[in-house]
Amino acid sequence: MAGLVPPIHVFSLDEEKTWMPGTRPGMTENVSKEHAMNVNIMNVDYSTKIPNNVNLSEDRQVLKALEGWHPGYMDWWSDMGPEGFQQSLVYLRTAYSVDPRGWAKFDYVKMPEYRWGILLAPQEENRVIPFGENFGKPAWQEVPGEHRATLRRLIVIQGDTEPASVEQQRHLGKTAPSLYDLRNLFQVNVEEGRHLWAMVYLLQKYFGRDGREEADELLRRRSGDADSPRMLGAFNEATPDWLSFFMFTYFTDRDGKMQLHSLAQSGFDPLSRTCRFMLTEEAHHMFVGETGISRVVQRTCEAMKAAGISDPTDIAKVRALGVIDLPTIQKKLNLHYSLSLDLFGSEVSTNAANAFNAGIKGRYKETQIEDDHQLKNATYPVLKLVDGVIKRVDEPALTALNMRLRDDYTQDCVKGLLRWNKIISLAGYNFKLTLPNVAFHRQIGEFRDIHATPDGVLIDDATWNSRKGEWLPSPDDGDFISSLMKPVTEIGQFASWISPPKVGIDNKPGDFEYVKIET
Ligand code: BYC
């Protein structure tokens, strides 16, 4: 076990710089303008049962609906939220404002007492719909009748993923590699719970009785349940160990980032404002993933060096050191990246085209793109299977929006790989983590009916079945990783397979007790 090094200010990916209170969240493009206009809704009202900055105390009907939903949420949290630790004091951040210059405060909280609230980013005066057929018209403050079903579907899908991830991660507390990591897990979990509240607020305020029914359904479905599963594939997969958790927060939360960015462009202003604030919290989740994987890679490299191992693919020798070998890390990466690609839907999608035309779901950084924002004559290259070969084919840009968002996502993913590979090369090893080809291990879209290697070579069923254990975690890999998942609960100590972080949460020192465990 290693001790926590003293905190130094090193942050990695751009969005990860943004999650500390007192710094500027990177997701809002017009923060300073908005700030000048909206000081009045910055602070959160804690006088109602549901903390909020949407004036719920004067919106009795919605407040009543949310208060009616609250007990079911608490039951769900107690049944499906983190297993154990509910009486422990956890050093959590809670949003008390949406002011980008300082929006969160840290304190010890028992998780069931966390104040899940409704927080929207400030309203931008005279905001217009930034894309689609309604381009340039005033943003909607109410749901337009003709787009009601599409909007509701997108909000329900978004809402469904939030509790799903908490359900997937509920067992992980038992095997946390440190109190620091345990606290990060719980921070992610309570904020995913808050994101569920965010979507439920929209459903209950703007969608009447159907919205209330959908809000109830969000508490009824369960990740991985045979009869009542969560809506999207990746949210029904298991998160069996901490390496999976870090991969999930790096790759799957990053799909969340891309989808939330697209919805933050929405002409339906309450959805846009909700997603903009969610992105502020989401940044920390990806920070947990990126630094988590960095720390695993770091530890493996250090252990290999200390033992004089020159070949990082000598799996047996590396595993004997009690660290996770790089080829197994690559397999986990292959799994989580490919599952996350499926979350973008089909490459060519009329659903996506309709949502864009309507002004409901835009592109990543829509307002920064220089074009007509209507995609009238534009095309976009889409990877397709043509006569058994993967080729780029120009498609109307409007129907290729999922592909475009997925490409933006892939570019965003690469940044982490560069950092992990730098750790490996600085340690003197000739090994590179890579993203598998988009045709590899897919269940949705163009490549769902074929098999391909991580290099994108098409293979038949028999080859896939005999070789898939080389590319995806096998039961043996799972058993090995499980064998390392022993809880470490001593203050400032870390499991053998992961390095301490470079910096503590809220700049706390290495010997800080992030979770005061109470059983
Ligand atoms: N699994 O035209 P298609 C997050 C369905 S993560 C199952 O190809 P479309 C988070 C689709 O529903 C972000 N079904 O795709 C991360 C449709 O069914 P219906 C969550 C799938 O509609 C970590 C049919 O196939 N937010 O926040 O253009 C922790 C044809 O659809 C899947 C969103 O996703 C799948 N993977 O795009 C916590 C944003 N893919 O309606 C949180 C909202 C497709 O014909 N959602 N289908 O029965 C959307 O924008 C879109 O619905 C999708 C799909 C991107 C999901």
Image (spheres, rainbow, N blue to C red):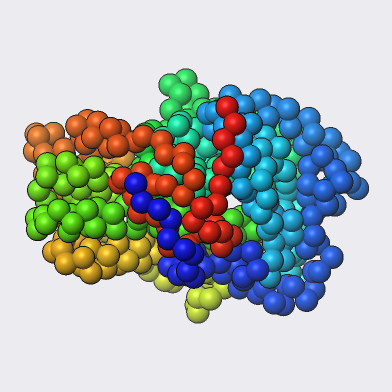
Q: Horizontal and vertical percent for residue 504?
A: 51, 59
Viewer-nearest residue: 233 or 185: 185
Find residue 268 and report its image quarter.
Answer: bottom right
Residue depicted at x 47% and y 63%: 6
Compared across the picture, whether 498 is left or right of 49 comes to: left
Visible residue check, residue 140: no
Rendered position, 453 above or below 422: above
Look at 16% across and 67% down and name the residue there. Answer: 428
In the figure, is residue 148 to the left or right of 441? right
x, y percentage for residue 396?
39, 64
Residue furthest top as drawn: 227
Indicate the quadrant where residue 132 lies.
bottom right
Q: Residue at x 66, y 46 (%)?
A: 108
Q: Nearer the viewer, residue 371 or 156?
A: 156
Q: Nearer the viewer, residue 223 or 14?
A: 14
Asked if 497 appears above or below 122 in the picture, the reply is above
Query: Does 128 sit left or right of 29 as displayed?
Result: right
Q: Is residue 231 left or right of residue 134?
A: left
Q: Is residue 73 above or below residue 107?
A: above
Residue 38 visible in image: yes
Quarter-wise, where is residue 466 in the image?
A: top left
Is residue 200 depicted above or below 348 in this figure? above
Residue found at x 74% / y 73%: 35
Q: Quadrant of the C terminus?
A: top right
User: How many numbered badges does the structure rendering display?
Assistant: 0
Coordinates of residue 465 in the picture (x, y in percent): 13, 34
Image position, residue 439 (x, y; %): 24, 50
